[in-house]
Image (spheres, rainbow, N blue to C red):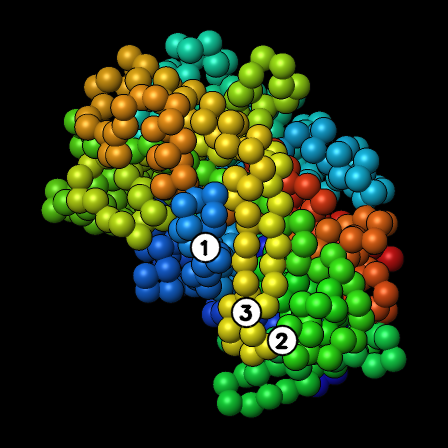
Amino acid sequence: MIFDYVIVGGGSAGSVLAARLSEDARVTVCLIEAGGGGNSLLVRAPALVASMVSGRPPLNNWALHTVPQAGLNGRRGFQPRGRALGGSSAINAMLYVRGLPADYDDWADLGAEGWDWASCLPYFLRSEGNARGASALHGADGPLQVCNQQSPRRISRAFVDACESLQIPRNDDFNGPTQAGAGLYQVTQHHRPPRRGERCSAASAYLFPVLGRPNLTVLTRTRSERILLEHGRATGVQVRRGLRRLRIEARREVILSAGSFGSPQLLLLSGIGPEAELAAHGIALAHDLPGVGMNLQDHLDYTVSHRSKRPDVVGLNPAGLARLARAGWKWRKTGQGLFASPMAEGGAFLHSAPDQARPDLQIHFVIGIVDQHMRKLHLANGYSAHICQLRPESRGHVGLSSANPAHPPRIDPAYLSDPRDVAKMVAAARLLEQILEAPALAPWRGARLYPHDGSDVALEADIRNRADTIYHPVGTCRMGRDELAVVDPSLRLHGVNGLRVVDASVMPRLIGGNTNAPTIMIAERAAEMIRS
């Protein structure tokens, strides 16, 4: 099979690229996705994210793990990643967050010329179909539907009140003129019939409406094994589809959109990367590129959970399950109610200290008990608050666990390897505890899970015992011009023709917030670069 463009990975970036590139009827596009179709009820119903994120069973989820983390007392972290069309946008909390303009200006300063805020904003606007309407900072006509939450819980508004009582200002738009403050997140959710109230994944926004195009081929349940190379050029991809091994050839370009773990893994399997890493697994060197897999950054998350005195939250007891069942019926009829909830309804962007120029902490307030990514279940009604450090200093890497493409990558985020991150997380956890003890939450506040004696020593120990990812890995194929950069600012791989990387792995540095909207923006811009 021969196409003009071959895209590996049907996640947030791949869905955008396949839709945008196939707008030109003169070219042919093939999208290769290892997972399934991404349009089941589990994906469409926002509240059912709880059934997928745990990876037990691994529904639409790669359910990856890190290597043992010294900073987390030797624990292996869990890394849920989407395994379906839409990728992680099919299993995330749907929160629409861009970060700050200064985050993108940082990218440009780090060698990603042309990726400053002024250059990126038009592509955010192009992607966004915000129910609030068009403005200088929002788009109204883009494919990605964004809206206020359909039916937020009273406790989520009480969380905002609790923040306000501690002099944290109310903020109704985290993507507006200022990010700092507390409020309710906007979500990537259909706000127009007939899918009102359903999750708007990247596939739902971009890909599903154009699947009938004759120049677009989408292969699901097809695992990419290696990039085909000839004379320093990428010419296609070798894949396994069921029991068959196939060659999918590209006349123009191969584009990797397999994410911050999958894209470096496929490069390494193809002989592209650090020579020592390849030699350790018996893979012949095709192109020595030492930055492949390096620069891994992620938001480490600490959670405080409480049982609730009131039942108007999520619980897995018989009464709570009955409420969920009734809510599911209401959602199917109206698109509203508890089933339309992202679960992480409230949030805040905070300064850990007065001398911080921009918010460096983020809170996700969840209307149920979330313990170990829902891998440890609690029957009680309850709620949770998560806090993460937005710009960690620690850096990890992604490598191979073996030369077998069916084996997962070796993931080492090196959490808390930089002592500055330890101090920042302790300060963050202390601030979170103060918010949760505010009077506004008293009507709900029951017993705390995992209490401690209140000392900094005990708090640090609890962080090392329980903290884990909030699902924002980036940076492993970063763009730039230096010797450790993997792609140039046009996202072309250094030293190999006909090959680009377009996903969160190209970010030079984490942005201050959730990474889905920026990934979609990157793909919008990349599509224009490729077409031109």
Image quadrant in which you'd find residue 451 = top left
Q: CA distance from mark 3 to mark 1?
A: 13 Å
Q: Amino acid at mark 2?
A: His
Residue 200 visible to an observer of this rendering: no
Callout 1–callout 2 Cβ contact below 8 Å: no
Q: Compute the Cα span from label 1 to label 2.
A: 20 Å
Q: Which residue is mark 3?
A: 401
Q: Neighbour class for label 3 at 10 Å: few (<14), some, many (≥20)?
A: some
- 16 up-or-down from 111: above or below: below
Name the residue rendered at 79%, 79% in the picture: 229
Mark 2 neighbour density, 10 Å: few (under 14) some (14–19) many (20 or more)? some
- Element type where label 2 sits in the image: loop
Q: Which mark is residue 307?
A: none
Q: Which mark is residue 68?
A: 1
Q: Relative to residue 509, is residue 196 drawn left or right?
A: left
| Most foreground residue, 140 or 123 | 123
Residue 247 falls left or right of residue 445: right
The quadrant holding residue 9 is: bottom right
Q: Report the residue at 42% width, 50% height from top.
A: 74
Badge 1: residue crowd in 10 Å (few <14, some 14–19, many ≥20): some
Q: Earlier in the sequence, mark 3 or mark 1?
A: 1
For image coordinates 57% across by 83% down, the residue present is 240
Name the amino acid, label 1.
Pro
Give the amino acid type for the residue marked by disc 3 in the picture.
Ser
- Determine contact: label 2, label 3, CB under 8 Å: no
Instruction: Work out how far the residue at label 2 is from the one at label 3, CA to CA, in angstroms.
Output: 8 Å
Q: Which residue is mark 2?
A: 281
Q: Are marks 3 and 1 in contact (CB under 8 Å)?
A: no
Per the image, label 3 sits on a secondary structure element best described as loop
Task: Identify the secondary structure beneath mark 1.
Answer: strand
